[in-house]
Image: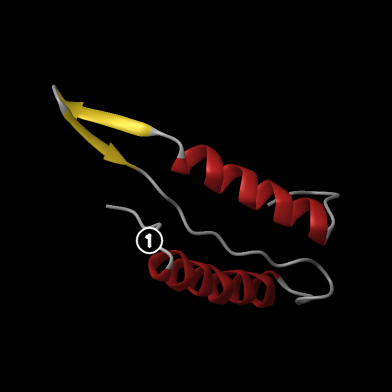
Amino acid sequence: MLAGCGREEAGQKRLDLQKAIDDLVLEISPGRRVSLAISAGLAVFPHDGTSRDELLATADRRMYGDKDSRKRHGVAPF
């Protein structure tokens, strides 16, 4: 949740967070590295809903859309 954040700023923060995590490489044991990725959804009050449940449902739906899109483009968690 981001208080006082409009759609464009929230969208950019989502992209920045995804990129920061995409750039991480975790060494889980000597010589064994894995890449990380996340999917995220965005909902803005009141445009996308006026209750917590409406906003969460919209963000959740968009997160799954983001996840599908990232998988199609080769960016997915291991």
Q: Residue at x 59, y 64 (%)?
A: 41
Q: Is residue 34 left or right of residue 67?
A: left
Q: Residue at x 30, y 31 (%)?
A: 26
Looking at the rendering, which quadrant does residue 34 occupy?
Answer: top left
Asked whether, in this view, residue 73 is left or right of residue 8, the answer is left
The spot of residue 47 in percent (x, y) is 83, 75
Residue type at mark 1? Answer: Gly
In x, y percent, where is residue 45?
A: 81, 67
Q: Residue at x 45, y 67 (%)?
A: 67
Q: Nearer the viewer, residue 31 or 37?
A: 31
Secondary structure at numbered mark 1: loop
- Which residue has dot 1 on it? 74
Q: Is residue 72 above or below residue 39?
A: below
Q: Residue at x 41, y 34 (%)?
A: 24
Decide which of 14, 70 is in the foreground and name it. 70
Q: Position of residue 68 (x, y in %)?
A: 43, 73
Give residue 7's position: percent from left, percent from top. Answer: 80, 61
Q: How is the image coloured?
A: secondary structure
Q: How many callouts does the rendering have?
A: 1
